[in-house]
Image (cartoon, helix red, strand yellow):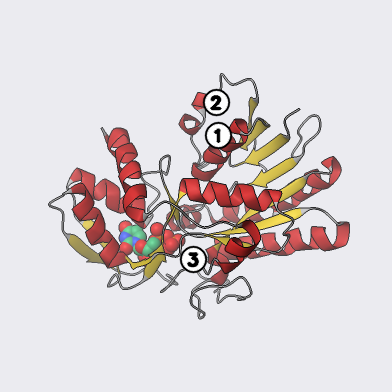
Amino acid sequence: MGKRVLITGAAGFLGSHLCDRFIKEGCEVFGMDNLLTGSLSNIEHLFPVKEFTFYNHDVSKFVHVPGDLDYILHFASPASPIDYLQMPIQTLKVGSLGTHNLLGLALAKKARILVASTSEVYGDPQVHPQTEDYWGHVNPIGPRGVYDEAKRFQEAITMAYHNYHGLETRIVRIFNTYGPRMRLDDGRALPAFLSQAIRGEDLTVFGDGSQTRSFCYVDDLVEGIYRLLLSDCHMPVNVGNPDEITIKEFAEEVIELIGSSSKVIYHPLPEDDPKRRRPDISKAKEVLGWEPRVSRSEGLKTTCEYFKKELA
Ligand code: UDP
């Protein structure tokens, strides 16, 4: 019999791709989402699949799932800077209360739980590239604090359940990821630039564009997460693509890819915006035998097709 898997944030970008993957692996998948930032259109193709069940539920409230569970993947949370600025309390609750509820559920069901952490736990990093043993540089009361500290608390309580209760836990630190089903209007650089270039609008670079990011294609990320879940590693593991680029160069790359006549325009840099970000993935390579395979040019082409369809 296939494993029974609960995926929270199932209607979101990453959650929906994870639902697809676990269905493909022959699992019975219970997708949970309160549709705050997720969209049913990301999972409607799964509704006819008998191994898939959807629960419209907010995991910050007590979570009930009937029957056994083998795995829980906690991916529910607003995840773009604009989203968590607009929903600061929900962001804090889903990372703290939501994680606590799911850890309790995992304990009751004797399930293994993987929680989605983030490169944001490193804040505006003073160590580059970021290794898992770096503790981070986070402003708790800044605009990003609601997300960063919720995720740091999430890691702390997950380790506590592992150490105190012996629960089987996994922590993935996810770096910037993109691909089809990413929301077009979540304010992030990649969807903003692609939509702007496709529409022929100017691309809004924040600051002077010298800050860097490293973008991972969603299929690579899902593979890394799948391997981490099945591994025996309870310590946090970075999963992301180390191919680092400045935001200004990235904007120019998108304009060239689309063949657009758009220009780059400059807007003020948001508060506490990390200056440099690139994962050190030595640990993922060693422990999971994983590294990304999809280049940015390849991944952007696929993502661009999706964006064009959505915008049409
Ligand atoms: N950014 C930008 N223009 C936009 C949106 C974002 O220049 O329209 C910048 C943002 O300030 C940051 C980088 O692009 O330095 C990546 O931002 P994103 O929101 O994608 O995610 P982050 O990595 O900051 O969480």
Q: Tell me the quarter of the picture where residue 173 sits.
A: bottom right
Farthest-out residue, left: 261
Q: CA distance from mark 3 to mark 2?
A: 36 Å
Q: Quadrant of ligand 1?
A: bottom left
Quick check: marks 3 and 1 in contact, CB under 8 Å? no
Question: Which of the pair 113/266 is nearer the observer?
Answer: 113
Query: Residue tagged by mark 2?
Result: 46
Q: Amino acid at mark 3?
A: Pro
Q: Is residue 155 above or below residue 196?
A: below
Q: Which residue is mark 1?
A: 20
Q: Residue at x 65, y 61 (%)?
A: 287
Q: Residue at x 48, y 77 (%)?
A: 128
Q: Is residue 305 left or right of residue 61?
A: left
Q: Nearer the viewer, residue 90 or 79?
A: 79
Locate residue 284, reporting x and y percent. Answer: 59, 61
Question: Which residue is at 42% across, 44% downward?
Answer: 182
Residue 56 drawn at (x, y percent): 62, 32
Q: Which mark is residue 143?
A: 3
**Does residue 35 appear in this view?**
no
Name the quadrant of the C terminus: top left
Circle 3 sits in a helix, a strand or a loop, which is it? loop
For the residue pair 31 and 95, the one nearer the viewer reads as 31
